[in-house]
Amino acid sequence: MPARNQKQWTADPPLQKGEWIDSRIYSEQTIFDEEIDKIFKHVWVPVCHESELPEPYDFRTMTIAREPIVVARGPDKEVRAFLNVCPHRGMLIERRPSGSFLEAQASGNPKRMTCMFHAWQFDMKGNCVYVAREKEGYQDRLCKEDVGLRRLRCEVKFGGFVWVSLDDNPMSLEEWAGEPFECLRKSIDAEPLQVFHYHKAIIDTNYKLWHDTNSEFYHDFMHYHNRVTGFNDAYFARKNFAYKNGHVVVGTFEVNYQNYQGFESRAALSFPHLPPNQWYMIDLYPGFNFNLRGSALRCDIMTPIGPNKVMIEFRGLGLKRDTPEERNTRINHHNSIWGPFGRNLHEDLVGVAGQGATMAPGSENRRILHKTLKDAMEDDKAKHNVLPPSRFGVIELTRQRVRPETEIDTSENCPTCNGTGEVSAPVLIVDEIENALNYLHGEKQMSGLTLSVHPFLAAYFTKGLPSIQHKWWWRWRKWVKVKGEGSHQYLDFTVQDSAGNEVPSFLRLGRSRFQARSLAISSVRRG
């Protein structure tokens, strides 16, 4: 299509409903106000982690849907949340971002939340325990028992995160987010976690643009680190699993960190129950992200400030029991990708800031078409990248040129007999492989094995949540890397040790024994 005039530019595109959106959803104040009122005042928000409140009387302050919040640990070790607002004259009670109420503040006493305006004091349960000149000022018209703080729903759950809702009657936290957390629950609940990194960024962009970026991986072409360590068949075979309440979980794959210069495998510090170098991501509506890359858990907590401004708090977490050496390694692993100067994070922020610049309040309305263009390019085998429409309506598309192969040999041996005319029952191949792995893991005490099979079998072993590959990990507590080899026939497989050498004793001597054992097992099953 040629360049368009203003009337053509602002006209609705000839597409189906839902295939384009109006850019005003990213810029209009009235839409933003409605989202704050109807969404953020009713959802559960992960405001911090329990390790940031390690001692009684520790507190942190934050904002949810424009309401100031204070979260504090009481002397009974319970974590509670309140509006950070004095019921007397609506004064902000605590101005510090974090600290301890153990020591007295101005106009107050130790172990109390004190409003500096008129010295009203509250305990860690939100009870008003002191009103200055109560009898002289109010006589019998008001007493401190009637003016406690506004208590909020608060729970500690899913790896020790502190969740708060402004709604007095929300759906349970388990019902709200339990299903998407199933993929990580065993890993993050196995033992206490601890925050080792915190920083925040305030970006001139709409909060939904950050949420959109976390929900799709088309933009991963922007990340050099991801291209080098992850662009393989397993990476592109991942699926997004949608859950009720708007949440999404991204399927896992194995990250090859060693492919990036200066990086190393992170298998030694994998979270409990997590196979080595695996990667999971949970994206909670309307914009809270939990991202586990083997040795470090990243959590993004997003606070919308305006239609074109958002604050994002980034936390990195490891295991509380870490030795100093392990903690330093986790910090390096986390910050090399997600720290303020890491490989990936600043690239994501530049991306959403650029969108925010073109869709600022007052800018001309645009019809955002990139979803349709992405759908059209979905089956394109060449590497490509589609940038959002510029302020002039130009969509930039970059595509890798691929030279077609001039001669393709499509012949191959019979996939079942390999040209011999004799076959074994295909149903036995899975039993045969599992018996072989059990023998090598158990009797031979080997680890770091790589199983090479036909791509169809590789997909069968690695797809799904949990996959057969993950079940092997839970069974032997040893990770088996599965490779799809186009040169293998359907019933052919090989095993390599941790050094990449083929296991000759298994190939020459053990296979008939494993096959015989498999036949016996199958006979019992049929009988």
Image (cartoon, helix red, strand yellow):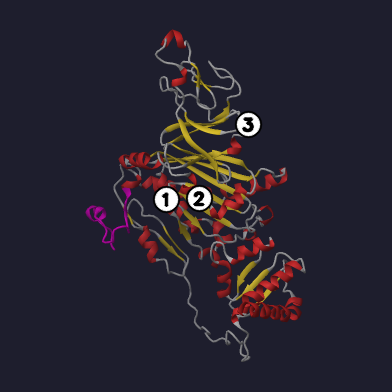
The residue depicted at 47 percent of the width and 10 percent of the height is: 133
- Position of the N terminus, as image quadrant, is bottom left
Q: Is residue 224 magenta?
A: no
Front-most of 269 and 255? 269
The amino acid sitting under disc 2 is Gly
Residue farthest toward the front in the current orientation of the protein? 527
The residue depicted at 56 percent of the width and 86 percent of the height is: 412
| In this rendering, position of residue 306 left or right of residue 270 | left
Residue matched to label 3? 55
Residue matched to label 1? 245
Between discs 2 and 1, the one toward the N terminus = 2
C-alpha span from label 3 to label 1: 34 Å
**Residue 434 sits in quarter:** bottom right
Q: Residues within 10 Å of mark 1 (few under 14, many from 20)?
A: few
Q: Which residues are magenta?
A: 1-23
Residue 485 in the image: above or below residue 163: below
The amino acid sitting under disc 3 is Glu
C-alpha span from label 2 to label 1: 11 Å
Between discs 2 and 3, the one toward the N terminus = 3
Q: Residues within 10 Å of mark 3 (few under 14, many from 20)?
A: some
